[in-house]
Image (cartoon, grey):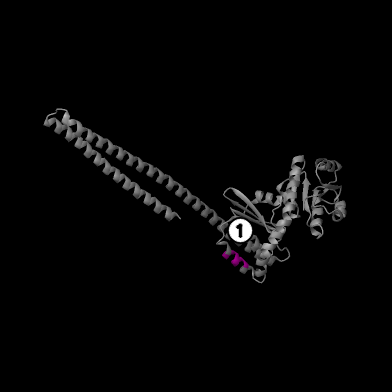
Amino acid sequence: MALRRILAVDDEPFNLEIIEEILEDLDFDLKTVDSGHECLAVVEEFDPQVILLDVSMPKMSGYEVCKAIKANPNTQHIIVMFVSARGSVEERMEGYSVGAEDYIVKPFGQGELKAKLTNLNQMLLEKDILAQQIEDATSTAFSAMANSSEMGQIVTYIEQIGDIETIPRLAEALCQCLKGLGLNCNVEVRLEGQKHHFATMGICSPIVVELFEILHTKGRLHEFTNRILVNYPFLSILILNMPGDDPDKHGRLRDHICFIASVTEQQLIAISTKRKLVQQHEDLEEAIKMVQGKFNSMVSLLDKNRQENEEVFRSLQELFEERIPTMGLDEDQEMFIYQNVDKAIQSSVAREESVREVKTAFHDIEEDLKLLSRRSE
């Protein structure tokens, strides 16, 4: 479902005029109101897909309006983007804690707002497709796990991930496990210089991605309202719906989440290690092929030199046998020439033996390289 209807809420008419001017050339049905109360009065009838909501308004703040929207089953699906002159971490976390999906700081440029809305539009388009895909893919697994205990589901997850070798499959299994515990989660995987995002509903909202960026180096565990964020070097898990009215269940699930995160971190390390080993093996195979090629070239060159030497001495011997008898040399002179030719031939034979020894050494090295390659597999 493409983005069509936007509701802008701000107590300053000038700010609403700016938004109208930025969006006037886009195909949006834009409605503007100047208070939180008016927003709540029109939101169900107008049914916007995105609300641009000012934070600082008299009588009813943007946070209060967002809470009311997210508490209403008829409007909780609407995407809320806070518009504020303040953009601190605390402000953003407060915005996220009341259910907002994105945050933009005043003053913002035309390109920034359009880019934000483009991202939200893409999120709307993908959300319906991914929600259906996830529902289809997980319904069978969740039905089988429905009667299992929490630890049974965790054990099943641990047994599954040992055979998983890709990040998307591991993230899918992780989300399924957490959803089987009744938890809605977002996941960030940081491996080999890349970041990957996953969620039980398929998409991480922009504000979640920002929270991962801000907090993944700020400690192992963060808890705020009914959210929990668990950090490991390669993995962060954000749980969105921790039980707030059952302290025992809350603590039990928190322990489960930390354990699951730890196990998943180890599997990510195993995946990374295997990738490196595979790459090392491929590099070794390539090096062996290169060395074998050079050895073969050198052996061919030695064979060629040996054949050329044989041809030279054969021609020389034939020439001497033909010419010496006609040169009028005495017996001592002929003997001197034949002896020196014979020495040269014997020296050539000795070099041929050296060539055979070099070829044997090359063959032994080649066999050692092949054995090393097989051991690295």
Query: Is 154 part of what is drawn in magenta?
Result: yes
Q: Is residue 65 above or below residue 342?
A: below
Residue at 57% x, 56% y is 268
Q: Is residue 285 above or below residue 322?
A: below
Residue with the most extreme left position: 331
**Which secondary structure is most common in the magenta stretch?**
helix
Q: Which residues are magenta?
A: 153-159
Query: Is 201 part of what is drawn in magenta?
Result: no
The amino acid at mark 1 is: Arg
Q: Which residue is mark 1?
A: 169
- Residue 91 visible in the displayed image: no
Q: Is residue 150 above or below residue 30?
A: below
Mark 1 residue element: helix
State the image coordinates of residue 54 (x, y, percent, origin top left): 81, 47
Left or right: where does residue 238 sit relative to residue 375?
right
Left or right: where does residue 57 sit relative to residue 297?
right
Residue with the most extreme top position: 328
> Which of the pair 263/346 is nearer the observer?
346
Residue with the most extreme bottom position: 147
Left or right: where does residue 98 sit relative to residue 36?
left
User: For residue 151, what is the image quadrant?
Assistant: bottom right
State the image coordinates of residue 257 (x, y, percent, origin top left): 63, 61
State the image coordinates of residue 251 (x, y, percent, origin top left): 66, 64
> Which of the pair 123/190 is nearer the observer?
123
State the image coordinates of residue 195 (x, y, percent, origin top left): 62, 50
